[in-house]
Image (cartoon, rainbow, N blue to C red):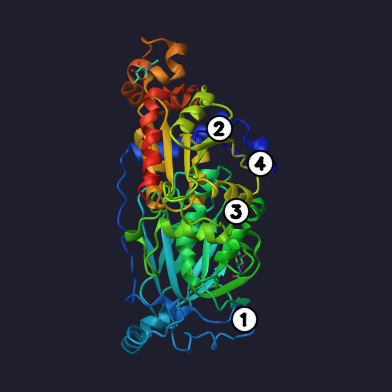
Amino acid sequence: MGGEVKPAKGLRRHLNAGFVAGFLLVLLTYVIVSQQFAMDTPTAVTSTAPRIDETGLVTKTSIDTEKTEQERQWPKETPKDASGAVSTEEFPKIHSTNAKQLENGKVVCSSNGLYSDTCDVDGDVRINGTALSVTLVPASLSSEHHEWKIQPYPRRTVSGIPEVTVTQLASPEEQAAPAACTVTHGVPAVVFALGGLTGNYWHDFSDVLVPLFVASRQYGGEVQFLVNNIQPWWLGKYEAIVRRLSRYDAVNLDRDAEVRCFRRVTVGLRMHKEFSVAPELAQGGQRTTMADFAAFMRDTYALPRAAPVSVGQSAPEKRPRLMVIRRGHYRKVVNMDEVVRAAKAAGFEAVVMEPRFDERVEEVAREVNTFDAMVGVHGAGLTNAVFLPAGAVVIQVVPYGRLERMAKADFGEPVADMGLRYIEYSVAAEESTLLEMLGPEHQVVKDPEAVHRSGWDKVAEYYLGKQDVRINVTRFAPVLSQAFDHLRHR
Ligand SMILES: *[C@@H]1O[C@H](CO)[C@@H](O)[C@H](O)[C@H]1NC(C)=O
Ligand SMILES: *[C@@H]1O[C@H](CO)[C@@H](O)[C@H](O)[C@H]1NC(C)=O
């Protein structure tokens, strides 16, 4: 994502220190990837009861400000799961044996390595936006008082995001209990933060849209978003997606004077991996995959193509379309014409595109969906792979300098998880403009490992910031053929 900070207009000036700010963004990914950070399986910090089928909380009412304290009991209607089916097994059993715990509610927090912690809070949950507090009030004397500080943005390395305090009270009389609810919601809530690295197209998806999908799609739109550090432009840009996940207007948590009450609240977004979903880490709810997210994108933007052309089956033969991503500033392909000719020789209809990130997302999505394959140098433009038909091909050109691990984590795995075919092409020293710029004896050209050992600064400065590539089309041709063959043999 090397520095292509393409924020909305209002932010542009602020971030125009661009180069520096942008590399800071990449650094966070780099740190995560290069430390070969293994994600912890979420460790539950459960205080009380067994796990309750959360679907018992999906009720039909949206907002009900009239109910009194007594009326805000555990839902009385028969619990339904997200599909609307009545669940007959587990719920009544738990209800009869653990009525007290059920009334007192529970907090389950999970820790996720370098990404942030999240908490699921069930019970009488009261949220005071001014205090950024989420408080579970037990019905009777409960266990001990517990407190968690949660950064509601999924990368803990990002600074400047105020923390939300999640408190489990020991008794209903405890001082810290917020006064009675001023608004009682009949749907669950998800609390998350904007700002952070959003404004960078890749981070918009990796850090917010994908984790938000994982957190909320089980509710089928019947969920309230409470947003800390709200960015109206961002919600506007991704309105189509956000609206499909929640039917209700997002609440600006920082300016909220209400005490809002819920029966279930998720605090923070759970990021499993870069720009993707690890189905095995999904908690509760339904199993979610990155392919589901891609399908959700196609659905959201009404993208007509769910599959690429099948080469060799249409008559007259239709050439598969290859989107060749052009970049504006650095990590450019300097011999674009040659690459396009090579792509045509391989059988593609090649079209050079320079995605502008201030373009309307629906227009970009529609355009991208007309393609069967995509090729681009490592960078945010490849994020658009989410709009390709399932089974399409993505070729990532990895610039010189041992960037393969980062490239794989940022795009390689995500693209494969989406159900696309991923092909990687690593640029050799001879294809890098660093060679002519610095000469063969310079450490940057001669010994990338040493540059990596020296730290992030030089990696960012040279390999991401000062490098363009001149693709050797003789060397590249087999990669194009491989992409073409994949479409033929589908
Ligand atoms: C919400 O928190 C603020 C700031 O801590 C506090 O002044 C206010 O009294 C709280 N509101 C309620 C209803 O507890
Ligand atoms: C391009 O790649 C081919 C095949 O690997 C190689 O033989 C040739 O020398 C390369 N050309 C340049 C200019 O490096």
Task: Let me know if residue 406 appears in the view.
Answer: no
Secondary structure under tag 4 reads helix
**Can you tell me whether the CB of the residue at mark 2 lies under 8 Å from the nearest atom of ligand 2?**
no
Q: Position of residue 403 (x, y in %)?
A: 38, 31
* Disc 3 residue type (three-letter): Asn
Circle 2 residue: 326
Distance from disc 4 to disc 2, alpha carbons, whole Å, reads: 24 Å
Q: Position of residue 103 (x, y in %)?
A: 42, 83
Circle 3 residue: 229
Specify which label sits upstream in the sequence, 4 or 2.
4
Task: Let me know if residue 421 appears in the view.
Answer: yes
Residue 64 badge: 1
Q: Is residue 62 above or below residue 370?
A: below
* Disc 4 residue type (three-letter): Leu
Q: Residues within 10 Å of mark 4 (few under 14, many from 20)?
A: few
Specify which label sits upstream in the sequence, 1 or 4.
4
* Disc 2 residue type (three-letter): Arg
Quadrant in which residue 396 is drawn: top left
Q: Residues within 10 Å of mark 1 (few under 14, many from 20)?
A: few
* Disc 1 residue type (three-letter): Asp
